[in-house]
Amino acid sequence: MNQSQKSPAMKTQLRPSTLAKQALPWVVPISLLIVWQWASSAGILPSRFLPSPRAVVTSFIELSASGELWMHVRVSTLRALAGFAVGGGLGLLLGLLTGSLHWAETLLDTTIQMIRNIPPLALIPLVILWFGIDESAKLFLVALGVFFPVYINTFHGIRSVDRGLLEMGRTYGLSGWPLYREIILPGALPSILVGVRFSLGLMWVILIVAETISARSGIGYMTMNAREFMQTDVMVVGILLYAILGKLADLLAKGLERYWLRWNPAYQAAR
Amino acid sequence: MSVAIKNVSIAFGERTVLEDFDVDISAGEFVAIVGRSGCGKSTLLRSVVGLETPRTGTIILGNVAEHSGKPDVRVMFQDSRLLPWRRILPNVMLGLEPALLPHARKVLAQVGLAERANDWPATLSGGQRQRVALARALVHDPNLLLLDEPLGSLDALTRIEMQQLIEDVWRSRGFTAMLVTHDVAEAISLADRVISIEGGRVALDEVVNIPRPRTRGSARFAALEERILGRVLQRRSVF
C-alpha cells in the first residue's frame, strides 16, 4: 500500500538521472569516433595509417557480402573452440583428479606447475617445427594456453569446498559419486567458471598470435594478407572482429555463470 | 534407539577433551548436554555420529543384535548447512529416493515452510533455514536425532518457537534426542535429563521432573535452572 503510493513519484524522479547514467559511459567512445571520422575526412589522418570509420564499415559490408569474412570467422572460431575443448577439457579432468585424490596431486601437480611457467607462445618455433603451419599447430597452442587456468581453478575449487557441507553430506549417508555430484562439484563450480572465463580470453589472444604468424585462412590470415596490400580498412575489420569475438566469448561465460550460479546472491546482483 | 557411551576418551593432540566418559541413554529419551564452551560437548555428539573417533572406549547405538544395517542417526548443526545450490525442497530431499517427494513435502509443511519449497536457501532467514534443516533430518525418520547447538545463532523469539517445534516433533515421533546447548533454560525446557560436562567427565546428571509443557516462569523451573547454572559456573572460581 505504502509502496505503491510511493513508487510512481520515485520513478519520475529517478528516470532522468538513470538515463544520464546509462548514456554517460558512451560519451567518450562516441566522441572519439566522431573525432576520428573528422580527422580522416579532413585529411589529417592518412588512410595508409588508419582508415576512416566509414571506410571500415564499408569494407566490413563488402567482405561479409562476398562471404569471405564469414569463411575466415568460421575457421577461426572452430580453431578456438576445438583448442578450448581439448585444453579446457583436459584441465578440468586433471584438476578434478588432483583436487580429489591426494596421490594424484603428489604425482602430477609439481610437473604441471613446472610446465605452467613456460609461456605457450614461447613454444611457437618448436610447434612450427613439429606441426608445420598445419591446423594441429594452432590447436596445440590454444589447448596448451587454456589448459592451465581451467586446471588451477578447478583444483582450487575442489579444495575449497565447504568442509561443513561435506561433513553434513557424509552424516546423511552420501559418499562416492553422489557426494561428488551433490556437494563437491557444485561447490567447486564458481571457481571452475572463473577459470573458464579467464581461459576464454586467453584462447583468443593465443589464436591471434598463432594465426598471424602462420596460417592460410582465418581472421589472422586475412589481416596479415591485407597488410601486404596496404588494405588498412580490412586490417581494422579483422582487429575489431577479434574484439567482438572475445566479447562474445566473455558474454557466454558470464551467461553460464549467471545460470549455473543463480543460487548465489553474488551472481544475481552482478550485471 | 538407545545410546551407550562407555569409557570414551577423545584427545586432539596433547589436549584431552573427554576422559573415561560414561553415559547411558535409553530409547526415546531426550537428553541435553550442557557445559562451558570447549568442554567437549560437541565432540561427544560428533563421536556418536562417527565424525570423531574415540581413542579408547566404545559407543553402541541401539541393540547391536537388532541392527544389521547402518543405524538411522541424523544431525542438526549450529549452522543449517543447507546446500546453497539446491532449492528448499531438493535440500530436504538430500539422500532420499525421488519416490519419497510427497513425504518430503509433508515434512516441510510440518515445519511451516511448504510455500518456500521452490526458493533458494539464500533467501531464507536464519530461523527458517534451521527449520529446513530440521525437516531434512526428520524426513529420514531417524531413531536418534543429534542437535549440536542448533538454535545457538537464532534470536530469542525464534529460539522459543523452534524449541516448541522440536519438542512437539519429538513427542509425536518418539525418537531419541541428544541436544548440546550452552543455554541451561533451553536444556531444562526440552530435556528429560540434563548432563553437564566438566573436565572431560560427567559433572552432573539431573532428571528433570517438571511436567510438560514446561513454563519457564514456574518456581520449579527457576530453582532447577539456578542449581544447574550454579554447578556449571562453580568451577570458574577455581581457575
Image (spheres, rainbow, N blue to C red):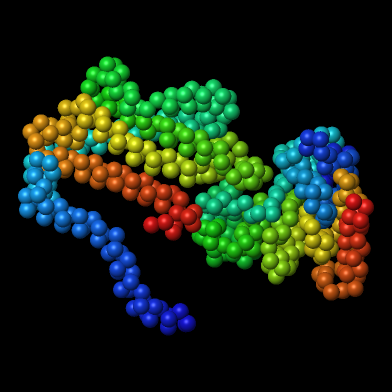
Query: Can residue B161 be seen?
Result: no
Q: Which residue is drawn at 16% across and 27% down?
A: A216
Q: Where is residue B34 in the image (x, y as percent from the top left)?
A: 83, 55
In the image shown, does B103 or A157 lie closer to the viewer? Answer: A157
Horizontal side of residue A170 vs B226, given as left or right? left
Q: Quadrant of the rendered structure where residue A179 is? A: top right
Q: Looking at the picture, does residue A70 appear above or below residue A6?
A: above
Question: Going by the image, does A95 lie left or right of A223?
Answer: right
| Residue A207 location (% of width, % of height) | 27, 33
Q: Which of A23 and B93 is in front in this view?
A: A23
Q: Where in the figure is residue A197, as x and y percent of width and height?
A: 38, 42
Position of residue B100 in the picture relative to residue A35 (left or right): right
Q: Which residue is drawn at 8% across and 45% down?
A: A46
Residue at 32 percent across and 30 percent down: it is: A142
* Front-lying residue, B63 or A86: A86
Q: Is residue A42 visible?
A: yes
Q: Is residue B26 above or below residue A94?
A: below
Q: Which residue is depicted at the point 88% across and 46% down?
A: B199
Can you say whether A20 is above or below B68 in the image?
below
Q: Position of residue B193 (x, y in %)?
A: 87, 57
In the current view of this chain or complex, which residue is farthest to the top?
A129
Left or right, residue A217 beside residue B21: left
Number of marks drawn: 0
In the image, residue B5 above or below residue A104: below
Considering depth in this image, is B169 or A33 the residue closer to the camera? A33
